[in-house]
Amino acid sequence: MKFVLVSTILAAFLITGPAAGDSGDGHNLMPAPAELSFGGGALVIDGSFSVSFDGYRESRLERAASRLLERISAQAGIIFIPAYDGIDGAGTVLSIRVDKAGEAVQSLHEDESYRLVIDGCGARLNSATPVGALRGIETFLQLIEPGPRGFAVPFVTIKDEPRFRWRGLLVDSCRHWLPPGVIHRTLDAMAAVKLNVLHWHLSEDQGFRVESKLFPKLQLKGSDGNYYTQEEIRAVVSHARDLGIRVVPEFDMPGHASAWLVGYPELGSAPGPYHIARRWGVFPPVLDPTREEVYAFLDKFIGEMTGLFPDEYFHIGGDEVVDDHWRANPRIQEFMVRRGIADSHALQTYFNGRVLKILQRHGKKMIGWDEIFHPELPHDIVVQSWRGRESLADGARKGYLGILSNGYYIDLFFHAADHYTVDPLGGPAAALSEEEKARILGGEACMWGELITPELIDSRIWPRTAAVAERFWSPAEITDVDDMYRRLEIQSRRLESLGLNHRAFTRVFLERLAGPGGSIEHLRILAAALEPVKDYTRHRTRDYTSHTPLNRLVDAIPSDSPFARRFNMSVERMLASREGWDLHKTEVTDLLAGLKANHAGLLPLLKSRAVLREIVPLSETVSRLAAAALEAIDSISAGIKPDDDWVGEVDGLLLAAEADKQPQHEVQIAILPVIKALVDRAGVQ
Amino acid sequence: MKFVLVSTILAAFLITGPAAGDSGDGHNLMPAPAELSFGGGALVIDGSFSVSFDGYRESRLERAASRLLERISAQAGIIFIPAYDGIDGAGTVLSIRVDKAGEAVQSLHEDESYRLVIDGCGARLNSATPVGALRGIETFLQLIEPGPRGFAVPFVTIKDEPRFRWRGLLVDSCRHWLPPGVIHRTLDAMAAVKLNVLHWHLSEDQGFRVESKLFPKLQLKGSDGNYYTQEEIRAVVSHARDLGIRVVPEFDMPGHASAWLVGYPELGSAPGPYHIARRWGVFPPVLDPTREEVYAFLDKFIGEMTGLFPDEYFHIGGDEVVDDHWRANPRIQEFMVRRGIADSHALQTYFNGRVLKILQRHGKKMIGWDEIFHPELPHDIVVQSWRGRESLADGARKGYLGILSNGYYIDLFFHAADHYTVDPLGGPAAALSEEEKARILGGEACMWGELITPELIDSRIWPRTAAVAERFWSPAEITDVDDMYRRLEIQSRRLESLGLNHRAFTRVFLERLAGPGGSIEHLRILAAALEPVKDYTRHRTRDYTSHTPLNRLVDAIPSDSPFARRFNMSVERMLASREGWDLHKTEVTDLLAGLKANHAGLLPLLKSRAVLREIVPLSETVSRLAAAALEAIDSISAGIKPDDDWVGEVDGLLLAAEADKQPQHEVQIAILPVIKALVDRAGVQ
C-alpha cells in the first residue's frame, strides 16, 4: 500500500456536518418555530417514554404516534415494547391534546398551529387539529438530543404556526421516471420540514405517468411502460394524508402534451402521428381547443382523476404553449375568426375557460402557471408564478391568489442561500397592501426532472429544500444565512435517518465511478472543491436527451459544497483582519497544500476511467490555483509584492479557470472567488 | 472553527474500500466461480445494452431482466428506455438461454449451474434452469466495471456451480422484531452472494411472529403486536422465489416455547400463566408431549403454515429443551412410566416422532437442531449442527443429512476470516467417505437476534456473510484470506448499492451519539481502532434484556474493523523485514501519532454525552498505547534497548489494556496485538 499524503486539516474539512465548536447558542430546529423559549432543564427519553392522547382521536394520530416511537428508536437505539409488562409507567410522557377533527380533505384553510410545552411535568402538545399535532410531533423529534443524562428533550415553550398556507414541492415524474418508493420517501422528508403540498407533475412531452382506466392508451402508449397504477397513486395520496400533505396533480394542457397524443392523436391540433419526446425543451404538440371531442375527453378524464386525487385544486399546467400547430391548422384558424378569437393567447384563454367549467362541474378549483392568468377567471383560481415576482404581485393586486416558484427552481444547482433569501412577500410584493399580500399563499420548490434519476434525486432536493421550507414556514425576520447553514447540516443528518440517500450519495457514486479496484481518496478531495455549473448552463453545454447517462462527476456532487462553504469562510475571515489572518492561516495553508498535491495522486485514476477523463485538466487547474494561492499567502506574509511575471501568469490562470466554467465536464471551481481574492490581496499590498 | 490536527495518513486509512494500488491481479467476483478464464477485451455497457431470451421463458426471468437493467442503471447512471425508438439495436446483448423450467417448488436438487461467455460476439448466459440464470445474472452484474472505454464487462468464460446445495442464512425475527422491509433487503443481498436458503426463525420465548388465522392468540398474545401478517409472509416467500431462494420456516418446539403458551397455556407442561420472555437465555416453558390436544393443535397449525411456506422442509427447532416442567408434572412422569419412556431426551424423541408424522401427513420433511437426532428418524431429515463439526460428521456416518452452523454464528462478533476458514467438510468431516460427505449439504450463517435492531442488523450480517457465502459456493481450494478481504470490500460496496445500510451505519450512528451539535471527527478515529468483544462476552458483561437500548459505541462499530486490519498488516510487514520497516515506518508512525493525539480532541465530546462517557478511559488507553508504540519505534530505530522503568510501565499498560477487555463498554482494542509486538521487539534488540 502506498499513500500520497493527504493534507492534515483536509481530513477534518471533508467530514460534513457541524465542526466541533460550531454549535450555535440558538436552537437546532428547522424550520424555526414562530415563538420559542427555552427553560433550564430537560426530560430524559428512554424506553419508558410513552405517548398519551387526550381530546379528539383518530387513527391518523395513532399511526403518527407509532411512527414517533419508531423514529426515536431508530435515532436513539431505544427499544420500545408496546404494553411491556416490565415498564413502571414512570417515564416521560408526551401528552397530545387535539381539539377537533381536521378537514375531511385537507385544504388551504387547515389549521396547522400547535403549542408544545416541555417542563418538569412532562411534554404537552396541543393543537386544534390532527395536522397541527403532526407538525408538533416533528418539532418534538427534532428536539431530542443526546446529552449528559442520555437522550433528552430540553424544557421549552413553543408556539408555532406557518407563515404561509401553501408550502409545496413540485416533483416531476415525467422527464425521468421515478418509481413510487421515491415519492414516498420524498413525502416523509417533506413532512419532516413541514411542507404541506406535493405538486405532482404527471404529464409531459416525455411521459404520461398515470394509469387511466377510461383512456388506457394514455399510459400504454405515452409512458414507455413507466407509469403509476391507480393503486400506487392511492397509496401515495393516503400516505400524504397521514403526513398532513396535500397532493395536487398536474396534467399539463394544452401544451407540453406530446405524451397525451401518442395514444390519442385525434385530440391534437396536427394530424400526427405523435411520439414521446426524447429531448428537453418546448415542443409543438398541443391539444385542439376547437373540438368538442377534446372537452368530452377531458371531462371524462378529469372525472376519473377526481376519484384518485381528492384535493380541491387541480393543476392544468398551461405554460409554454407553442402555437405552430394552431397556426398551421386552417380549421382552427377558421374557428378563431368565427368566434372572434383574436390570437393564440386568446385561444388558450378560451380553452382554459372551457376546462374551468369542467373542473367546476367536478368540484375542483383551477391552478396553473402564469400563462393561464386572464381577468375573466374567477378569484378562487391559483396562479403559480414561474416567470417572476412581478407577475405574482400583479395577480395579487388584481385580486388573484398566487404562489411563487420563481426563485425556487432547485433543478438549477443554485445554493441553498440563493433560494433562502427569496421571500414570496419580498421584492415587488413588499409594496402590496395587507389585503393584497394575503392573496399570496406561499410557494413551491420545483424539482424539474431533466437531470435526475431515482438514485440522484435526493441529492438534488435535499438538504436545500429544507431552507426553502423554512422560508415558507418561519417568520419573515429569520434570515441569518450562516445560522441557516448550521441548522441545514443538522437537518440533513435527520433526513438521512428518514431513509434519504442524499448524504451518502456522493461517496457511493464516486466509488462507482472509481470502480471496484479504485480508491476515492483523491477523487473526493477534488469533488469537494467543485460544484455543478449553475442555472441552465448544463443544457447549453451539452445536448441532453432523456437517454443521456447521468453518471459523471457533475451528477455526483451537491449543488452547494459544504467543504467549499467552510473553506471560503476561512479565507474570507483570514482576509478580513490581522487576527483573522493569524487565526486561519495555518488551516487555509494546509487545505491549499492538500489541494495542490491532490492532482498527482488523482491523475492515474482519472486517466483510466472514460467517465472521469474529461476532468483531467480541471484537476490540474485546481492544483495550480492552490499553488498560486499558497504563493500569494507567502507573499502577503512576507509583505513583498509579487513580481509582474507572477501576476501575469496567475491572472492568466485565473482567467482560464473562469473561462473554464462551461466546458464539457459542467462543473465549476467553487473556491475560485476566494483564491482570486487572495491573489488580488497579494497584488495590492 | 478550531481543528486538532488529524494524522495525515489516517485520513486515507479511514476511507474503507480498497486503497490505491490494492486491486489484485485476479477477479473481483464474490463468491468466486468454479472456473474462470479471462480473454483480452471487453464489451461496453451503455444505454443500448439489452437482454434477450432464448429457450424456456417464464415471468420470473422477465422480472430478473428488469431488475438487471434497474441495477445497471443505478450502478452506472445509464438510463434505459424500454422500446426506445432512438436505439439502433447495435448495443451489447446479454443472451440468456434457459433449457427448461425449474422445480415448481425449489428444492435441494434444483440445478443452479450456469455458463457465462463474454467475447467479441456478445454475452451469452446458458443454464439448465431459471435459478441457474439468476446466479449467472448476479455474476454478470459483478463483472461490470468502469474502465477506459466506459462501463464494460471483460471477455471471460465462466463455468460455475455451487459446491454445496444448502447455503443458508438464519434470520431471527423473534428476539428483536424485524419489520418486513428488513427481510426483503436481506433477501436481495443473499441473492447477490448466491445464498439459497432463508432460514426464518419465527417463534421463540421472546415472540411468536406469524399470524395464524386458526390460532390467533399465538400472535395476539405472543408478539407484543409485532408479527408478520399472512399477506406479508406471502410477499416474502414470493420475493424469495423470484431470487431463487428457499424459505424454511422455523417454529421452535417443544422448548423455546414461551410465546406459544401465552395465548394457549393449555399446551404447556406447567399450569401457567405464561409470559413473553424479556431476558435472553433458555427458559423452562415447554410443550406437553403427553397430551393428544397438543398434536391436534400442531396438526392444524402446521397445516395452516404449509399453505404459507411451500418449501419441502419444515424446521421444528428442537434445541435446548429444559425438562423442569416435565419433571415437575406428575401426569407427564406417569405417562413416561406407562409408555416406558426412559428419560426426558426419550420423551423429546417421542414428541419428535409424533411431529414427524404430522409433517409427513402435510408433505413436509423435518429439519431440526442437533438435539432432534435419533437413529429411528428417517434418512431424509436434516440435522442442523450448532454444537460442532463432530456431531455433523457423526450424523453423516450414520446416514443422515446435515448442515453446519457451528462456526458461522455471525452474532458473536468474530472476524470474517474466522468464519471463512471453517469448512463444512473440514475437521472431523475430512475423514468421511465420499458417500458420507455427500450427506453434508452445506451450512447456514446464523444471525441470532439478541443484540440487533432493524437499524443495525445490516452491519452485523454484512459484509461478513458474503465470506461465508463464498465458503458454501466456491471450490474448497479458494482459501486466500487476504484476497477474500480484498474482494469483501468490493462486495460490500455492491451490497450498499442494493439498499443495505451496513457501510453508512457506523457514521450515521456515531453522528446520532454525537448529537446535532457534535462533530464525529475524533470519535470515528477512536471507533476505527476498536471492535466489539468477541463470543458471548457481551452477555457475560451486562444483563441484557429485550428492552436494553442498543445505542452505545459497541453497537455502532463493525465486528471486523477494516482500519485495524490494514493497520495491523502494516505493522506486521514493518516487523517482518528491514525493507518492510523502511517501507511502512512513516505510515505507521503517522497513524500512531494520530491515535495518540486523538484523545485530547475527543474528550470534551465523551464527557458531555451520557452514552459515550463510559469510553473515556478506553480513549485514554488507546492514546497511551499509541504513545508507547511510538517510543518503541524510536527505540528500535535508534537501536537502543529501552530501560527497565519504561518496560515496566508499558507492560503494565498493556496488561491493563488486555484486562480491560470485558468492561462495561464491551469493546476491545483491535490494534493491541501489534502494539504489543512493537513493544516486545523494542525489548529484544
Image (spheres, coloured by chain):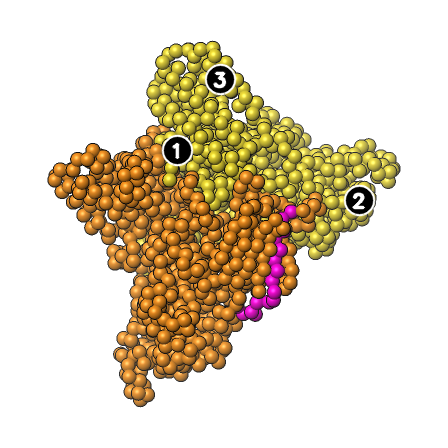
Chain colours: A orange, B yellow
Residue annotated with mark 3: B650
Going 75% across and 35% down the picture, which residue do you hit?
B322
The location of residue A438, given as percent across then percent down, is 42, 70
The location of residue A170, given as percent across then percent down, is 41, 63
Q: Which stretch did the figure color magenta?
A: A91-107
Going 35% across and 60% down the picture, which residue do you hit?
A422
| Residue B286: quadrant of the picture | top right
Q: Amino acid at mark 2?
A: Gly
Q: Is residue A105 magenta?
A: yes
The residues bearing labels 3 and 2 have C-alpha atoms spaced at a distance of: 58 Å
Dot 2, how many residues are within 10 Å of its Cα: few (below 14), some (14-19), or many (20+)? some
Q: Which mark is residue B4?
A: 1
Going 36% across and 46% down the picture, which residue do you hit?
A562
Q: Nearer the viewer, residue A156 or B61?
A: A156
Q: Are marks 3 and 2 on the same chain?
A: yes
What is the chain letter for disc 2? B
Specify which label sits upstream in the sequence, 1 or 2. Answer: 1
Which of the two discs, 3 and 2, sits closer to the camera? 3
Helix, strand, or loop for circle 3? helix
Residue annotated with mark 2: B272
